Image (spheres, rainbow, N blue to C red):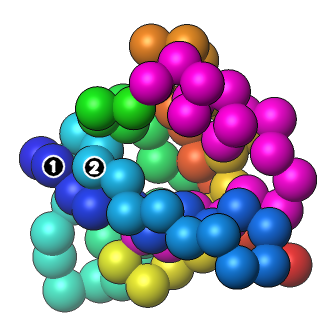
Amino acid sequence: MEEILRITIGPSNVWQVAADMNLEEGPSSQFAFPDSIEGRLLRLTTDELLRLKFGEGVVVGVRGRRYKFIQLEKDGTFRLHKDRS
């Protein structure tokens, strides 16, 4: 399912990025917001992907929850983990 992610780079640079990922729907927020999420970013250039991969202070917003990239490949596939900071 396509989701719109809110990605913050540094203190004030915010991107709205489409991603293909599968989040469970259900009554428990534990199912809707797992510790890690996998998916693929859509419609980004190689330069944009590199900026996200190597940028400092990159935080990914998924339905109001904060995550960080723990893996981001050049084809846009990613793995996120909950941001505990």
Confirm or deny contact between disc 1 and disc 2 (CB under 8 A). yes
- Of badges 1 and 2, the one in the foreground is 2
Q: Residue at x 53, y 18 (%)?
A: 46
In the picture, residue 16 is in which quadrant?
Answer: bottom left
Name the amino acid, label 1: Glu
With 60 as the anchor, is 26 left or right in this view? Answer: left
Residue 74 in view in this figure: yes
Disc nearer the start of the sequence (1/2) = 1
Q: Residue at x 80, y 68 (%)?
A: 10
- Describe the element under mark 2 as helix, strand or loop: strand
Numbered label attached to residue 2: 1
| Front residue (pair 41, 39) | 41
- Describe the element under mark 1 as helix, strand or loop: strand
User: In this picture, is 30 found above or below 35?
Assistant: below
Numbered label attached to residue 18: 2
Image coordinates of residue 70 in percent, x first then y, are: 72, 39
Q: Quadrant of the C terminus?
A: bottom right
With 72 as the anchor, is 33 left or right in this view? Answer: left
Residue 23 in view in this figure: no
Image coordinates of residue 45 in percent, x first then y, are: 44, 24
In the picture, residue 26 is in which quadrant?
Answer: bottom left
Q: Residue at x 81, y 35 (%)?
A: 54
Does residue 49 show up magenta in the picture?
A: yes
User: In this picture, is 79 found above or below 15?
Assistant: above
Dot 2 surroundings within 10 Å: few (below 14), some, or many (20 or more)? Answer: some
In the picture, residue 6 is in which quadrant?
Answer: bottom left
The segment highlighted magenta reads: 45-62
Does residue 36 show up magenta in the picture?
A: no
